């Protein structure tokens, strides 16, 4: 049942924030505040500018419903929120009624930086707050609303930068948490950022950005990590000029004003973000802008200059199934041609790691090929972090639920989320094993948020990651410690991605 339907706004007394008081709901002993503005609406002259504070208010603001999602094109995977608007910079808070100085978890949603919102049903649960943390979920600008680069934007910027506005939104949300979360019972000195897919990439980028330094103290990456390759601001400015002309706006001093005056739907490109391979949106939207990212994040991580915070990272057993069906690879010849394009002289090595003797082998090979991008990325994240932070942990989620079996996608991308958030749908909620798995994973995540170490509570011991041991925890109804997970494949991808 949606939280908003479970209680009235009068149940939770107003809480004062730096911009004005907010009133929320009470659900199962948890205070829930939805749709709190953390920045002004990025519309009109504020379109494609860094976020600025919202206009203060004096009377209690009813924070009882999710705000609109950033405008986005339809996608066949990510659920669409009906209400969409450029006025989307809002966050949501779940906090136990008697909370005081609790650890804080700030979740960044996925969706390829072009889809999704904090209102998706699997994030709408009091379970994490019931496990002793204050949970915050956020919206941020997406697609060309959040990542448009243009020479005129760079010229007007005090930092000589453009693009990455969605990432600047995330920093603004973290600043709001720093300034306000104590009033909700949270400890601003114990903030964990966690995200899935593009949200996990965001976590990696926040770890590399000087603008976010000190605003968080632990990090969790679920099925994503800091990218190894990003375009420069100049490359993305060229792309921005191409979009400007595609939108029918002529070059000249009035171009930027005309672009800002365009209705939101003109900036939506059908299918944007519906990528044939994961990571395409990073290459097509984000850049090393010179402000949020003064330099390439891979260089920052490789040199050990990222935020030295405890880190958990991992992936799911069948990450690739959501993308493998999109690729137009139907024959052995097409498969080998694709490998030659990707790997050139190293294509024979790739063929040996992903053998395809007949067309019947293609679905599994494609899925594993793509899935290993996530697995290798998680391993790379912990290998980069472990030298600067001993509390580093690697997981692999392998649980096959009724949903995964019925979907035909296996342990698909994002399938761990309902277990982490304790938001199991009715089709699996009745199983004691499913509930126990969710309780276990929520416990690992919240203990990590509290102490930087997921261990305790009688759970199976999760060893810290070291390059020599290469250990991970397999998360299933019976968790198991393992080592050397697909080492040959991860080593191959590691060389390709500069590990």
Image (tube, rainbow, N blue to C red):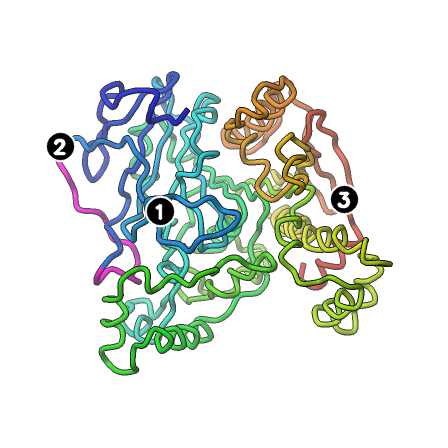
Q: Which residues are magenta?
A: 44-59
Left or right of 262, for residue 449: right
Report x, y in % for residue 148: 38, 66
Left or right of 48, for residue 77: right
Q: CA distance from mark 2 to mark 3?
A: 55 Å
Report x, y in % for residue 389: 59, 43
The residue under label 1 is 69
Quick one: label 1 or label 2, which is nearer the N terminus?
2
Please report the residue visible at 46 percent of the width from the left and 54 percent of the height from the top. 113
User: Is there a contact, CB below 8 Å, between mark 3 and mark 1?
Assistant: no
**Total numbered circles:** 3
Q: CA distance from mark 3 to mark 1?
A: 38 Å
- Location of the N terminus (image quadrant): top left
387 or 206: nearer the eye? 206
Q: Secondary structure at mark 3?
A: loop
Residue 105's image quarter? top left
Does residue 477 show up magenta in the picture? no
Using a 10 Å C-alpha cutoff, classify the residue at mark 2 as few (fewer than 14 neighbours), some (14 to 19) or many (20 or more). few
Residue 471's image quarter? top right
135 or 112: nearer the eye? 112
- Location of the C terminus (image quadrant): bottom right
The residue under label 3 is 485
Residue closest to the far left: 58
| Residue 253, label in figure | none
| Residue 59, label in figure | 2
Q: CA distance from mark 1 to mark 2?
A: 25 Å
Please report the residue visible at 36 percent of the width from the left and 73 percent of the height from the top. 150
Using a 10 Å C-alpha cutoff, classify the residue at mark 3 as few (fewer than 14 neighbours), some (14 to 19) or many (20 or more). some
> In the rendered image of this protein, does residue 123 appear above or below residue 428?
below
Q: Secondary structure at mark 1?
A: loop
Report x, y in % for residue 268: 38, 61
């Amino acid at each position: 049942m949606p939280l908003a339907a479970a209680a009235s706004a009068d149940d939770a007394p107003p809480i004062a924030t730096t911009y004005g008081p907010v009133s929320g709901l009470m659900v199962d002993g948890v205070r829930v505040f939805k749709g709190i503005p953390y920045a002004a609406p990025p519309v009109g002259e504020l379109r494609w500018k860094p976020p600025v504070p919202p206009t203060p208010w004096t009377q209690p603001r009813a924070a009882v419903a999710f705000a609109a999602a950033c405008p986005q094109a339809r996608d066949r995977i990510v659920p669409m929120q009906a209400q969409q608007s450029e006025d989307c910079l809002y966050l949501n808070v779940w906090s136990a009624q008697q909370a005081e100085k609790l650890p804080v978890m700030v979740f960044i949603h996925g969706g390829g930086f072009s889809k999704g919102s904090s209102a998706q049903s699997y994030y709408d649960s009091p379970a994490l707050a019931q496990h002793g943390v204050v949970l915050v979920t956020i919206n941020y600008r997406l697609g060309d609303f959040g990542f448009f680069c243009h020479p005129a934007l760079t010229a007007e910027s005090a930092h000589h930068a453009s693009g990455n506005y969605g990432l600047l939104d995330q920093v603004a949300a973290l600043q709001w948490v720093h300034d306000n979360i104590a009033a909700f019972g949270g400890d601003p000195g114990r903030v964990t950022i966690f995200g899935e897919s593009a949200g996990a990439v965001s976590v990696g980028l926040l770890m590399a950005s000087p603008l976010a330094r000190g605003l968080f103290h632990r990090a969790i990456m679920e099925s994503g990590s800091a990218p190894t390759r990003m375009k420069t601001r100049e490359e993305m400015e060229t792309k921005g000029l191409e979009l400007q002309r595609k939108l029918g706006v002529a070059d000249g001093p009035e171009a930027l004003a005309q672009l800002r005056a365009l209705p939101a739907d003109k900036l939506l490109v059908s299918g944007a973000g519906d990528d044939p391979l994961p990571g395409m949106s990073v290459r097509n939207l984000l850049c090393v802008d010179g402000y949020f990212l003064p330099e390439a994040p891979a260089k920052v991580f490789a040199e050990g200059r990222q935020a030295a915070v405890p880190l958990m990272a991992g992936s799911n057993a069948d990450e690739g199934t959501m993308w493998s069906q999109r690729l137009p690879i139907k024959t052995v010849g097409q498969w080998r041609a694709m490998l030659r394009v990707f790997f050139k002289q190293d294509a024979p090595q790739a063929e040996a790691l992903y053998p395809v003797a007949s067309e019947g082998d293609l679905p599994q090979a494609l899925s594993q090929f793509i899935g290993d991008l996530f697995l290798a990325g998680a391993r790379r994240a912990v290998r980069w972090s472990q030298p600067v932070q001993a509390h580093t942990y690697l997981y692999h989620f392998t649980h096959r639920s009724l949903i995964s079996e019925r979907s035909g996608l296996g342990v698909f991308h994002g399938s761990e989320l309902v277990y982490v958030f304790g938001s199991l749908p009715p089709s699996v909620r009745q199983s004691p094993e499913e509930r126990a798995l969710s309780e276990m994973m929520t416990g690992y995540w919240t203990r990590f948020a509290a102490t930087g170490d997921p261990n305790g509570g009688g759970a199976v011991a999760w060893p810290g990651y070291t390059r020599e041991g290469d250990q991970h925890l397999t998360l299933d109804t019976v968790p198991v410690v393992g080592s050397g997970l697909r080492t040959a494949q991860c080593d191959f991808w590691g060389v390709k991605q500069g590990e």
